Image: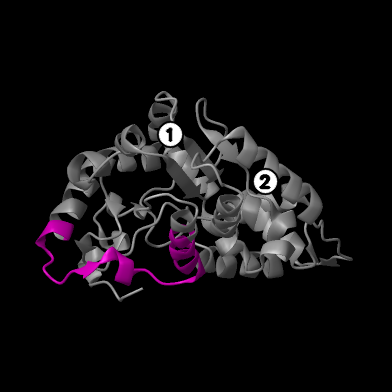
Amino acid sequence: MLVPPPALRVGSLPTGTVSSRLETWTDRVRAERDRTPLSGLYKGEHWLQAHAVVDAATRAGFEAELWVVSAGLGLQPATASFPAYAATFSAGHEDSVASAGVDRRLWWKGLQERIGTSTLADLGSRSSVLLVLSEVYGSVLTAELGELGQLGGDTLLVGGSEDIPGVQRVRANGSLRKALGGTLTGLNARMAGSWLTHCEDGVLTSPATTESWTRWVEHSAHRETYNRTPMTDAEVKDFIRASAAKHDGISRTRLHRLLRESGKACEQKRFANLYSETMGER
């Protein structure tokens, strides 16, 4: 990702209400003249896999467009141009928009009203929608996902935080990482790409596609087992800091799972307490 100017780092915003911080933020975004298409602004495995999902959707017969769910820009097409920025919904990050879930949702609502190009329901009213969301981002978008689900359209959510009426959901599944390759960061996008290889009738959530995917998962899932190594409190905290910085948007639950999958041991309640101490989330 390009280096953002200091004013376009959420961490530089003055303290205040969500509304006042949003007003300052969106004024700064609008004022910056140095802009880049979003398709060239983002880097990393998840973004590379997002492009791969678009290619897979095209091969499956869809007229695919890539949209971005951004903590700094709202919902935007990848063709839109914006300045480099630093903003995230991940708690404890220096550029996190808010520490509390309710404030993160207020931020998203206000951001969409101020500079968002569209809503999920707008997209769903025009075509099929395939969403790839982390737990944190899925939680922030709960209200918009609900409005999308009310349309009763052809909608698939890979990842997310909870089941939404009217939206077919495929939960993140770590047991597929061996079959799909890559890291935890790109797993949801790789799952979405794999789903599309099972879609042969032009309907994203058809019974035939769902059945084909389910059979593949049953055949391909691989539950990894470890003789895990105990960790001190300091080691766990170091892991939390490093991993939270590396995996933007990762939740505490997923972070604990990542630690366990790395072959380390930390009981769930102890990890939750250490996470709160480290990230300031209580």
Q: Position of residue 81 (x, y in %)?
A: 20, 63
Q: Is the residue marked by circle 2 packed among few (<14), some (14-19), or many (20+) residues within 10 Å? A: some
Q: Is residue 264 visible?
A: yes
Which residue is at 68% across, 55% downward?
A: 256
Depicted 3 relative to depicted 223: above or below: below
Which residue is at 47% across, 54% downward?
A: 57
194 drawn magenta: no
**Labelled disc at residue 26:** none
Residue farthest toward the right in the current orientation of the protein: 227
Q: Position of residue 248 (x, y in %)?
A: 48, 61
Dividing the picture into quadrants, the one containing residue 43 is: bottom left
The amino acid marked with disc number 1 is: Leu
Q: Which residues are magenta?
A: 29-55
Q: Position of residue 158 (x, y in %)?
A: 55, 46
Which residue is at 46% across, 34% downward?
A: 154
In this view of the protein, which residue sits in the foreground, 25 or 16?
25
Q: Is the residue marked by circle 1 packed among few (<14), some (14-19), or many (20+) residues within 10 Å? A: many
Whichever of labels 2 and 1 marks the residue nearer the N terminus, that label is 1
Find out whether the residues at labels 2 and 1 contact each other: C-beta distance under 8 Å. no
**Labelled disc at residue 213:** 2
To which residue does mark 1 refer? 145
The amino acid marked with disc number 2 is: Trp
Depicted 167 relative to depicted 177: above or below: above
On the rendered image, what quadrant is the C terminus found in?
top right
